[in-house]
Amino acid sequence: MLASWYDDQGPAADVLHVGELPDPVPGPGEVRVRVTVSGVNPGDTKKRRGWLGSSMPFPRVIPHSDAAGVIDAVGAQVDARRVGQRVWVYGAQSYRPFGTAAQYTVVPDHQAVFLPDHLSDGPGASLGIPGITAHRAVFADGPVDGQLVLVHGVLGGVGSLAAQLAHWAGATVIATVRRTADLDRVDPAVVSHAVALDTGDPAAAIRSYAPRGVDRIIEVALSDNADLDNAVAANNAVIAAYATRSDRTEIPFWPLLFNNVTLRLLGSDDFPGEAKRQAARDLTSAAAVGALTVAAADRSPAGRHRQGPRPRRRRRWPRPHPAHRPPIARTRNTALLNHPALRVGPSRCQVIGPAAAGERGRPVDPRHSSPAGSELQVDRYTCRDGQAYEAVRRTSRP
């Protein structure tokens, strides 16, 4: 197979090689994916450079953890019917030597996530590290329905997905950008209020939209924003930080303590396995109903990454064809969304599946019915690739 790899750490131009390597073979519980798009993230380049003194984890590394492609082989204990399925991949080079910068990659079965037929490969390859990090930042401390969520760096990869997931789950999203000139780039359909950090008093601007403070803060630069976060956090708020610009970050400890603020630090490689799997389900569901806009770089042919990435631009998921779009009930009824019969996550617009084909229109528990004149039912539908799904819909009562 054609692949890119490095045997030593250092600058890309000095250590990256492009050439032929043996095709990988899936072991028990694994699948092999023919990669169509490989996603590169900042963490991939940091590993290659030896950031924070990290050493080579393996004698040879094929970089990149994220991708999209098609399963072309499976190992023992994996359903053979997965062959030919389009998937997006996460964690391919997390505690493993060979990632997705190759024609083929091998990952555990659950790390190759079904990609609905109406979604393209490019955004699919952008969901792994940024999407799962965003999901954990938003939902690790419980539902956000009805809460005020502040997202710093909303134009970034993680920040944009976090804002969309929070909005999708029923939160009111306040966001920050670095410069006033960037305010026009913020999506008003997702962000209720945007604040530029180069204004005279961003804390006062945020407090004008959230007089009692914000409930959650999604933090990309804790070293820069610790005092600002302290100024706008509500009592019992959570700061979920996935990055900082100073290795030894100072925080206003006592004010945060007296305000009962929780500081959650997020390292995506070591999230709990079930948290990653739930994130994968929710991200796929959000993408399936057109609820995500993914910031992804233009595609480059294999080997071009030695010249450096191209500028990033925003790419919108194609809207599903009406024949493949499930009727989704938009509800903020958290009791309904957590009902075990529906098998849903924290989202208020959720596609549930894959599921075995079966009867259509089974009723939802009447205790969770919607207001008078309508009720909620679970329907099954099938995409072009034959995968069966369930979706919640609202119907009129006779």
Image (tube, rainbow, N blue to C red):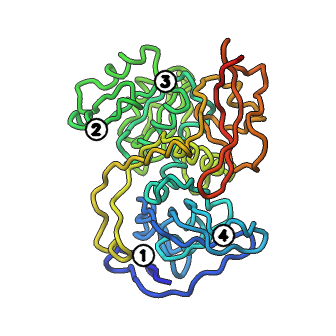
- Number of other residues with Cα within 10 Å of mark 4, as a class: few under 14, some 14 to 19, many 20 or more: some
Is 41 in front, or is 345?
345
Q: Is residue 132 left or right of residue 151?
A: right
Residue at 60%, 23% in the rendered image: 332
Q: Is residue 267 visible?
A: yes
Instruction: Sort mark 3 into few (<14), some (14-19) or many (20+) by Cα contacts within 10 Å.
Output: many
Please tell me whether mark 4 or mark 3 is closer to you in this view: 4
Q: Residue at x 55, y 31 (%)?
A: 169
Q: Which residue is mark 4?
A: 83
Tell me if mark 1 has few (under 14), some (14-19) or many (20+) residues whose alpha carbon lies within 10 angstroms of its own.
many
Tell us which disc is closer to us: 2 or 4: 4
| Disc 2 to disc 1, C-alpha distance | 36 Å
Is tag 3's residue or tag 1's residue first in the polypeptide sequence? 1
Q: Secondary structure at mark 3?
A: strand
Tag 2–tag 3 contact (CB < 8 Å)? no
Q: CA distance from mark 4 to mark 3?
A: 43 Å
Q: CA distance from mark 2 to mark 3?
A: 21 Å
Query: Which quadrant is the C terminus positioned in?
Result: top right
> Residue 256, percent across and down?
50, 27
Q: Position of residue 234 (x, y in %)?
A: 50, 21
Instruction: Give whichever of discs 2 and 4 has the lower sequence position.
Output: 4
N-terminal of the pair, mark 1 or mark 4, is 1
Cβ–Cβ below 8 Å for labels 1 and 4?
A: no
Mark seen at residue 185: 2
User: In this orientation, which residue lies closer to the viewer: 336 or 224?
Assistant: 336
Q: Residue under circle 3?
A: 148
Please tell me the numbered disc located at residue 9. 1
Location of residue 312 (image quadrant): bottom left
Residue 397 appears at what percent x and percent y? 70, 18
Q: Nearer the viewer, residue 18 or 282?
A: 282
- Dot 2 or dot 1: first in sequence order is 1
